[in-house]
Every structure is written in structure tokens, then in C-alpha cells.
Amino acid sequence: MIGPMAREWFTYEALKACLDTPREVARSAANNLVYEAETENEYLPAHLIWERGADDCDGFAIFQCTILEAKGWDAKMIGLSIESAEGHNVCGVEVPWEGLLVLDNGWIEGPFESLEEVARFYVEKGWMVEGGSLRTLRASAVQTRTTDYTEPSVLDLPWTVHAY
């Protein structure tokens, strides 16, 4: 169910029932979703991302975090300077025996000790602007297609802004 071709065999709901750990979710995303840059900043609910089979970093983050949230994990989207062109979205999940893992387009980074450490890591990679915003959001808050031009807009979603 986490290997390639799962999209051909499983509906989103059936897949969600089969995935239990951050590593399974990351592997499933990496094997079944294609990274595709968007021409418009668009956030979709996880089931639509699965049906489409492709999205950019926010789609991967929404997909992974929504499944983990449903399984009881403390998972949140992390928006790194998303108000800028250099912004990036990842899925952060607290794993009690490891720390904060970051699921980034199907890859796992970390563990990290804090959100601030995540921010520093992405500033060094050039995927976050020094002094940019660090935000978290429950991916389940993305219930409908949301863009920079819808009401609410992407930045109007119930993000929590953190200092770093």
C-alpha cells in the first residue's frame, strides 16, 4: 500500500486507514505523488491531492499531515517564509522517542529539537528567508481549495506564528 501504484488500487480513505507511522506516510507520498510546481499558490484538501496525484510542497505537507493528524499524531504544517517567493511548506510531526521529524516532499529530515532549529536548517538550505515568518497550521483546516485570491486566502488560514 505504500509502494508505487497505490493510487491505482486505493481510494484516499482506504489508503489513510493503512498508514500508521510518519515513515509509512512519507514513503507513500514519495512513491505515489509527483512533485509539480504550481503556477498559482493553491492549497487543497488531502483527498483532492491524492486524486490529482501531483502537487508542490504545500500539497505534500497537507497530504502527509492530514493522514498523521487522523491517526492521532501531533502533526502540523510548517510554513517557512510562505509570504515570500522563497517560501516552503513541510509537515512537522512530534515523535516522542525521536523528536520533531520533518516530512519534506516525501523525505524525512531531522530529528530537530525545536521549530527554531527547523527554521535555521531551512534558512541555511535557502528555502526560508532570514527573518521570514515561521508558521504552523493543522492541515485539517484546509477544507476547500484555498489560494492567495480566495476568501480566506492562504495567509488567512488559522496559522500560528512563531518567533525563531
Image (cartoon, helix red, strand yellow):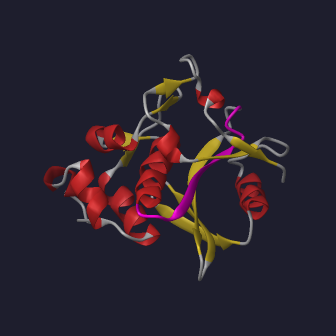
Q: Where is residue 65 in the image (x, y as percent from the top left)?
A: 48, 54
Q: Percent position (x, y) of residue 108?
A: 53, 67
Q: Residue at x 56, y 16 (%)?
A: 149
Residue displayed at 61% across by 80% down = 98
Find out whether residue 151 is within the magenta segment. Answer: no
Whether residue 26 can be seen here: yes
Q: Residue at x 27, y 66 (%)?
A: 18
The part of the image, by quadrant, that contains residue 111 is: bottom right
How many badges with numbers are in the image? 0
Q: Is residue 80 within the magenta segment?
A: yes
Residue extending furthest bottom? Answer: 97
39 relative to 31, above or below:
above
- Residue depicted at 28% across the width and 62% down the height: 17
Left or right placement of residue 76 versus residue 60 in this view: right
State the image coordinates of residue 124 (x, y, percent, origin top left): 76, 57
The range drawn in magenta is 71-83
For the C terminus, give its image quadrant: bottom right
Quadrant in which residue 23 is drawn:
bottom left
Q: Which residue reaches farthest left?
A: 9
Left or right: residue 43 versus residue 95 is left
Name the image quarter holding residue 75. Answer: bottom right
Quarter in which the N terminus is drawn: bottom left
- In the image, residue 154 sits, relative to residue 27, either above or below, namely above
Q: Is residue 39 visible?
A: no
Q: Answer with left or right where residue 15 lies relative to residue 143.
A: left
30 and 146: which one is in front?
A: 146
